[in-house]
Image (cartoon, grey):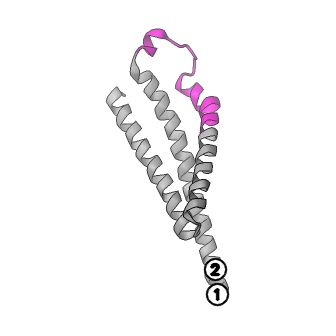
Amino acid sequence: MINEATLIVMLIVLFFLIFVSVGYLFFVVIEKLQMTKIKTTVYIFALMIVSFIVSIGIYHFIVGPLVDPAHMQIDNLRNYSFYYVIGWNAYFAVLTTILFLLALGHHVYAVKKERDYFTKQS
């Protein structure tokens, strides 16, 4: 049975994963792709805005109906705070997934770029 404490702990874990994925994006872009800190900050800021908008779209059209599939808007259920926490968990899970995929994509691109650079040097 899911209770409110479990949902809050999961929300904290999702926040942590978001921070890790964004921090790893900064690391990959600055260290491996060798961008300046100002360009990296602007790039990551733009990437976060786009990720935020995409995650809102995915949540609104795909995940949101699954969180409350009947759209019943049951008042006595909505009085419990965990009803909203379930939605926040679903939204941040979508955002975390998008950011992890971006970090993975940047890592793969950086490794490929690094491999191509060393191949040209040989």
Q: Which residue is mark 1?
A: 121
> Along the horizontal axis of the image, is 50 left or right of 83?
right
- Residue 56 in magenta stretch: yes
Q: Residue at x 45, y 28 (%)?
A: 86
Instruction: State which quadrant residue 77 falls in.
Output: top left
Do the residues bearing badges 2 and 1 touch, measured as CB atoms within 8 Å?
yes
**What residue sits 52% from the left and 59% below the top?**
26
Binning the other alpha carbons within 10 Å of mark 2 as few (below 14), some (14 to 19) or many (20 upward) gives few
Give left or right: position of 4 versus 52: left
**Which amino acid, mark 1?**
Gln
In the foreground, 19 or 35? 35
Q: Position of residue 31 (x, y in %)?
A: 52, 69
**Where residue 41 appears, x then y in whole percent?**
56, 56
The quarter of the picture where residue 52 lies is: top right
Helix, strand or loop under label 1: helix
Q: Which residue is mark 2?
A: 117
Q: Amino acid at mark 2?
A: Tyr
Q: Nearer the viewer, residue 69 or 99?
A: 99
Q: Main secondary structure of the magenta part?
A: helix
Q: Which residues are magenta?
A: 55-79
Residue 23: x, y in percent?
47, 56
